Image (cartoon, rainbow, N blue to C red):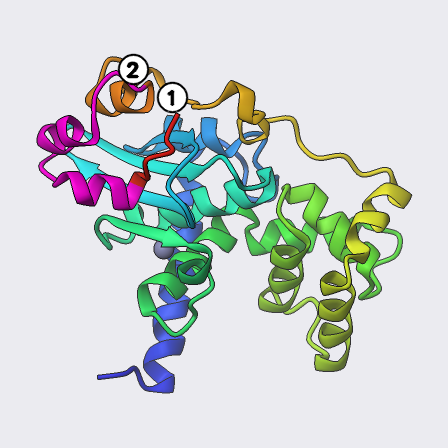
Amino acid sequence: MSETEAEKQLRRARATAAGLEARAQTDVPLDQPLACIVTTVEASFDLVVVIAQLGDGLAGSYAKRPGMNVALIAGKDAPVRRRFTLAHELGHHYLGHGPRDDTSATLSDDANPDESSANRFAAEFIAPRQAVERFVGALDDDSPTLDLVCRVANHFAISPQAARIRLETAEIVTDHRQLGRLDGEIIDGQAKHCFERLGLEDRDDLCRLPAAKLPRLPAEARGSALADFIDGQISAEQLGAAIGRSREQVEDSLGRSVV
Ligand SMILES: [Zn+2]
């Protein structure tokens, strides 16, 4: 049975509240951006972060195994995407959704309650409303332009699309005509020039690791079956046996191209 509008609103509000609650468990003040989401997540939650070349089409995955919960993040994605996917997988973990694989389609599936909730959680975790309000409030010019979107995106190290959605959900930009114009400018690829013109550079964190330095494994995962699989030392069948999944399930979720 699908949700009523009232149920949807309540679920979204709860997911946002959970994102704020989770964020309050970290040592980063709620009105500040995260210096490195990988470091913060691993220090504050029972979740380890692996950034690797995953199977075709996979953006991320949340895996639950005895003694270790893992967020797998696709190395093919840009750093801004990796950060949001990690916050989304943390959402699945924190909200008790259970293991799952995410593609770019599931990450934007607002009709699926779990996916929509994980995104609400992620937005509040990465860019708490009060942090967005404080940052925008301190700008000399807070008019609803692409410059504002890019400054918010850069401050929180998220994509222009994510920043534009955050400005709407935080009720900083509410005019639908202005929001539509910003969407058009982002789709048109104008954000890149805007970042250059404003001299904005991306955050130097673990999500910035180049492909040549992947996979990124936390200390906890080293020596595990997952690490051996990623290093090519064991087969998908052997990893499946270790984690209680079939070879097909391993290959579907991690792909044959894992390095
Ligand atoms: Zn998801």
Give the alpha-carbon distance from disc 1 to disc 2, as whole Å. 7 Å
Tell me the element at label 2: loop
* Magenta-colored span: 232-253
Q: Quadrant of the N terminus?
A: bottom left
| Residue for badge 1 | 217
Task: Look at the picture and state if 55 lies above or below 16.
Answer: above
> Residue type at mark 1?
Leu
Q: Position of residue 254 (x, y in %)?
A: 31, 39
Question: Does the closest atom of ligand 1 sit within 8 Å of the Cβ of label 2?
Answer: no
Secondary-structure class at tag 1 = loop
Residue 182, quarter of the rendered image:
bottom right
Residue 27 position, x and y percent, is: 47, 31
The C terminus - image quarter? top left
Residue 66 visible to an observer of this rendering: no
Please state the horizontal and vertical placement of residue 169, each as a whole percent of the image: 58, 67
Whether residues under marks 1 and 2 lie with C-beta atoms below 8 angstroms apart, the answer is: yes
Q: Say which amino acid is labelled 2.
A: Arg
Residue at image mark 2: 222
Q: Residue at x 47, y 23 (%)?
A: 214
Q: Is residue 244 magenta?
A: yes
Residue 68: percent from left, percent from top? 21, 29
